[in-house]
Image (tube, rainbow, N blue to C red):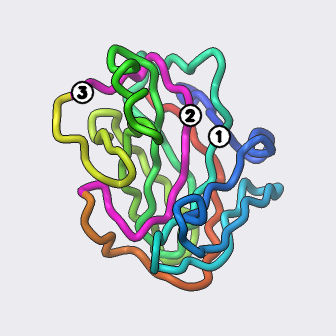
Amino acid sequence: MSKENILIADSKDFSTWRMINDTIMGGSSEGRCKVTSAGISLEGTLIEENGGFVSCCSPLFSPSLDFSGFRGIQINIDGQGRTLKIAIACEGNFSRLTQFFSTGIRWVAEIETNKFGTTVSEIPFETFLPTIRAKPVGFPLEFKSSSITQVQLLHSRFGTDGAINPGFKPGPFSILLRSISAYS
């Protein structure tokens, strides 16, 4: 990590993160977030029927994070060759609009991981796409890197375009999120 990066979370900060599984929508995947000395481990069993996702998310940042001077997010993750998603919630000029959607708008980007070892992925902010419940938003919105309120790591059967994620693998999994930072 270069000295221009600002750490969002690593093994010291993950203790406040929580699990969100597809069980909130009637699914039956089982997952848990476990903090380790190396990061946060997202592990369990993914079941495709009636959902097909597991995730770990940060608490709400208050005040929100201002990364307007940065180009994007860097993820260090051991992902077993899976295609994962990082989702960001923001405040901004569309915050009144999000009150009409139960889960709000999330800005999502995909991360293709190496089968073995740690994947270091830099994701530019301009590649994050607005979505609601894994479906792309069909009208123009502007990503507000100056008001990031939450970060979430997901493994889902759906990709950012709403189609089936080709890197989705149901069954047992163990993913280690080592760190997340903003990079310049």
Provide the residue designation for mark 3: 141
Provide the residue designation for mark 1: 58
Q: Quadrant of residue 28?
A: bottom right
Instruction: Residue lying at the far bottom in this picture: please name it.
Output: 171
Residue 149 part of the magenta segment: yes
Label 1: how many Cα within 10 Å (few below 14, some 14–19, many 20+): many
Vertical order, 111 against 165 (above or below): above
Vertical order, 32 against 147 (above or below): below
Give percent across and percent down for residue 125: 34, 34
Provide the residue designation for mark 2: 150
Give percent across and percent down for residue 49: 46, 80
Marks 1 and 2: CB-CB under 8 Å?
Answer: yes
Give percent across and percent down for residue 110: 37, 55
Which of disc 3 and disc 1 is earlier in sequence? 1
Segment tinted magenta in the rendering: 141-161
Vertical order, 97 against 136 (above or below): above
- From the viewer's perspective, tell me whether residue 78 is left or right of residue 31: left
Amino acid identity at mark 1: Ser
Q: Residue at x 30, y 39 (%)?
A: 130
Label 3: how many Cα within 10 Å (few below 14, some 14–19, many 20+): few
User: Helix, strand or loop at disc 2?
Assistant: strand
Label 2: how many Cα within 10 Å (few below 14, some 14–19, many 20+): some
Which of disc 2 and disc 1 is earlier in sequence? 1
